[in-house]
């Protein structure tokens, strides 16, 4: 699916805060100097989730679209090679969640352009 066609997509598939000083960026944007420059200007450090596979699955952008609460992180899973790498890296970036990070199949919603963070937003009308 073309990124322009995604109906739920926004920055939470690109980057996430690790803590108040550090932003985790998807490696798709490793060469995006504008994002990195703006974060640096804001006084933020950056880290990258770095998925290494021979052929990347088009759904792997969605790993940063996880649900984070004070008690747990629910990380998208798609039944692909990237799942294990994403889980291990998220565990490394969020050590305070040791034993509190689980993966959940998100194949149905990712095709609509979002996963856990997107579908759990609440708004007040």
Image: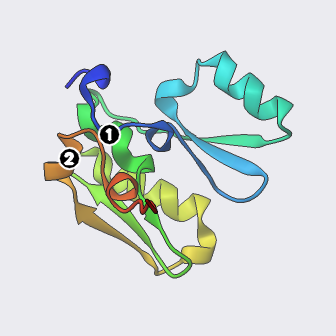
**CB under 8 Å between callouts 1 and 2?**
yes
Outermost left residue: 108
Query: Is residue 31 positioned above or below 28 on the image?
Result: above
Q: Residue at x 41, y 57 (%)?
A: 66
Mark 1, other Cα within 10 Å: few <14 / some 14–19 / many ≥20: many
Q: How many marks?
A: 2
Q: Residue at x 46, y 79 (%)?
A: 100
* Residue 60: assigned label: 1
Query: Gap between marks 1 and 2, in whole Å?
Result: 9 Å
Front residue of this view, candidates 24 and 116: 116
Q: Residue 114: which quarter of the image?
A: top left
Query: Is residue 21 positioned above or below 70 on the image?
Result: above
Relative to residue 1, is residue 83 drawn left or right? right
| The N terminus, quarter of image | top left
Front residue of this view, candidates 83 and 119: 119
Q: Residue at x 20, y 50 (%)?
A: 109
> Residue 96: x and y, percent?
62, 75
Asked if residue 57 shows in the view, the reply is: no
> Residue 79: x and y, percent?
17, 53
Q: Residue at x 21, y 55 (%)?
A: 106
Q: Residue 93: which quarter of the image?
A: bottom right
> Residue 60: x and y, percent?
32, 39
Asked if residue 6 shows in the view, the reply is: yes
Relative to residue 50, is residue 17 drawn left or right? right
Relative to residue 36, is residue 125 drawn left or right? left
* Residue 80: assigned label: 2
- What element does badge 2 sit on? loop
* Residue 82: assigned label: none
Front residue of this view, candidates 85 and 31: 31
């Amino acid at each position: 699916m073309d990124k322009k066609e995604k109906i739920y997509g926004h920055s939470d598939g690109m980057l996430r805060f690790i803590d108040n000083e550090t932003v985790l960026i998807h490696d798709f944007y490793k060469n995006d100097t504008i994002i990195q420059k703006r974060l640096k200007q804001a006084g933020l450090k950056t880290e990258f989730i770095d998925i290494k596979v021979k052929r990347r699955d088009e759904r792997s952008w969605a790993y940063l679209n996880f649900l984070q609460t004070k008690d747990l992180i629910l990380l998208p899973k798609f039944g692909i090679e990237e799942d294990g790498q994403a889980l291990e890296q998220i565990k490394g970036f969020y050590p305070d969640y040791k034993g509190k990070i689980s993966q959940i199949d998100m194949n149905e919603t990712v095709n609509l352009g979002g996963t856990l963070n997107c579908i759990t937003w609440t708004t007040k009308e």
